[in-house]
Image (cartoon, helix red, strand yellow):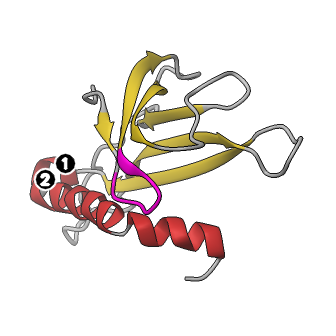
């Protein structure tokens, strides 16, 4: 996993042509990679980059031990197909009120991929990721509004 930088942000009202420059960071576990957002582009009034007291990071994680398919039983079924869980973790510092220390916004996305799917049905994995990325991008403004208003 090696994301290109800068990342172009999705369309959200109040931000004009947002871009985010990634700098490699250290994830606290060997099964993850992390990047800090160290520079902003476009017009993003009031948005801050990464700092110790106000993080702005994205991390990607994978399972510590990848699961594989087990053996088939006499009926030709595989018992207990495990899932390999991959994740994206966003951390963004934000001020909750005047004269208060920043608190961290936490965003998570997890993909639980059944063992064996990577080899037998990779097109479905690609479709799932493609749709998720497109859905988040196409609905970024609505998701931001929901997080601001609480209205679903």
Tell me: 121 left or right of 148.
left
Local SS, label 1 = helix
Q: Residue at x 42, y 35 (%)?
A: 60
Alpha carbon separation for disc pair 1 and 2: 5 Å
Question: Can residue 24 be spotted in the picture?
Answer: yes
Q: Which residue lies furthest to the bottom in this view?
A: 152
Q: Estimate the x, y position of residue 150 in percent, counting from the top left.
A: 65, 77
Considering depth in this image, is 129 or 91 the residue closer to the camera? 91
Q: Is residue 79 above or below residue 69?
A: below
Q: Estimate the x, y position of residue 57 in percent, counting from the top left.
A: 52, 32
Q: In this view, does 17 lie above or below 128?
A: above
Q: Which residue lies furthest to the right in this view?
A: 99
Q: Which residue is drawn at 55% across and 82% down?
A: 152
Considering depth in this image, is 70 or 88 the residue closer to the camera? 88
Q: In which quarter of the image is the N terminus?
A: top left
Q: Which residue is drawn at 31% across and 60% down?
A: 137
Answer with the quarter of the image where residue 63 lies: top left
Q: Estimate the x, y position of residue 41 in percent, counting from the top left.
A: 38, 34
Q: Name the residue under label 2.
A: 122
Q: Mark 1 points at which residue?
A: 118
Q: Give the range drawn in magenta.
A: 10-17
Q: Do the residues labelled 1 and 2 touch (CB within 8 Å)?
A: yes
Question: Can residue 32 be spotted in the picture?
Answer: no
Answer with the quarter of the image where residue 5 lies: top left
């Amino acid at each position: 996993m090696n994301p290109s930088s800068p990342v172009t942000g999705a369309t959200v009202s109040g931000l004009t042509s947002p871009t985010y420059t990634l700098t490699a960071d250290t994830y606290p576990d060997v099964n993850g990679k992390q990047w800090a957002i160290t520079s902003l582009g476009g017009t993003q009034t009031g948005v801050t980059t990464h700092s110790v007291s106000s993080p702005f990071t994205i991390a990607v994680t994978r399972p510590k031990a990848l699961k594989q398919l087990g053996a088939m039983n006499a009926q030709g079924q595989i018992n207990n197909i495990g899932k390999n869980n991959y994740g994206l973790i966003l951390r963004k510092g934000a001020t909750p009120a005047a004269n208060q220390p920043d608190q961290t916004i936490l965003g998570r996305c997890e993909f639980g991929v059944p063992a064996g799917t990577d080899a037998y049905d990779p097109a479905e994995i690609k479709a799932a990721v493609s749709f998720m990325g497109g859905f988040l991008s196409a609905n970024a403004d609505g998701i931001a509004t929901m997080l601001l208003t609480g209205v679903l």
